[in-house]
Amino acid sequence: MTGAAVPDALRGPIERGEIGGRTVQLTKTGEVECVRYDSAPLADGHVRIRTVRSAVSAGTEMTFYGRGATNVYLHKRWNEELRLFEAGTASMEYPLAIGYRAAGEVTESRAAEVAVGTRVYGSWRHTELTSLPGEVALAQRLPDGLSWDDGVDLAQMGPICANAVAYGEGQHAGRPAIVFGAGVVGLLTAQVVRATGADPVYVVDRLPRRLEIAASLGFGTIDASGPDDLAAGLKRRHGSEGIPVAWECTGSTRALHEAIRVVRRRGTVVAVGFYQGEASNLILGDEFHHNGIRVVCGQIGNVHSSQTWRTLRASVTGMALAREVEFGRLPRLSMPVEDASRGFAALQQPGDVLQVSLTYDRDA
């Protein structure tokens, strides 16, 4: 069966072998499609991988979804030289093939050191077939003892959270810590925070189901929808100097403000969330001003100076093998890649769905 016509926006990735077979793409009208593209010939020194699982993030990926998509790359141009967003033609255009959480199996190899059947994890798109240089595939072998669902988060989601924790500068070790948000990023960040020495670790959210998941992982939970003053309650429990670091993983400026209120004087708030629009709930004349709070962006595009991509991936893989961090245990709604539109729609109900996993069975 011949694949679909190649749109200009995807021509480069397809010609490089990054996209092939059944592929999820987002359209300008807000729809999600599953389209089949022919694969490019495999280059020397590369391997072709058949995706077994990919997972849709309820954070960044959803900022590209729908008619009202908010991602800044769709509305402004990123000037890499100046490191500024500027007005003008947007940096990205539809259709978009997105995704960064995947794992699969080598089905064809033109790299002598990589055998067919090797299990590999990576940060490729929601696409059935992709290719990687042989040395990259070797560096990203999925260890025995870890499942496909574990594997989808070793390349990027795990490092996102480990990098965010590194921005706490180790101040949380042996001390109480708090993580705002029981989404995937928050739940994984909380586990890394605990694995690196914080005790106790509290997870804050407004959704009962997500608080249940946090509790099942052994965390103290706090319902932010209640009438009590969250920060006052924690400071009465642990003292005004008790909590040195908080991680804000929701992307809500209201939660960012509350994180500022929670930490000690001259404490640190690591901003992990992707904040969209204006910060109307962020009040900088209160605790931020009077307590000298340090707010630092822990975004993965800026790897902490003590880390590299290699060390981040190695650390989260070690934590996963030791069961200090559970990736595959986090609930997911699983469906065939052809049903991706249903998966994206389901993620608009965060009280019911934490994340969505797409499958690429051979016979599908």
Image (tube, rainbow, N blue to C red):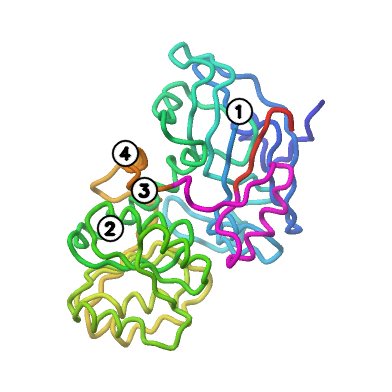
Residue extending furthest top? 112
Give the residue at mark 4. Answer: 318
Numbered label attached to residue 50: 1
Q: CA distance from mark 4 to mark 2?
A: 20 Å
Q: Is residue 281 left or right of residue 65?
A: left
Q: CA distance from mark 2 to mark 1?
A: 35 Å
Residue drawn at point x = 30 percent, y = 83 percent: 233
Q: Is residue 308 left or right of residue 5?
A: left
Give the residue at mark 3. Answer: 325
Q: 129 and 229: which one is in front? A: 229
Q: Residues within 10 Å of mark 2 (few under 14, many from 20)?
A: many
Of badges 4 and 2, nearer the viewer stands 4
Identity, as a three-letter code, of the amino acid under mark 3: Val
- For the residues labelled 2 and 1, say whether their Cβ atoms are less than 8 Å apart: no
Q: Residues within 10 Å of mark 3 (few under 14, many from 20)?
A: many
Q: CA distance from mark 3 to mark 2?
A: 18 Å
User: In this picture, which residue range is highlighted in magenta?
Assistant: 327-356
Give the residue at mark 2. Answer: 167
Identity, as a three-letter code, of the amino acid under mark 2: Tyr
Q: Earlier in the sequence, mark 3 or mark 2?
A: 2
Circle 2: element type: loop
Q: 203 and 313: which one is in front? A: 203
- For the residues labelled 1 and 4, say whether their Cβ atoms are less than 8 Å apart: no
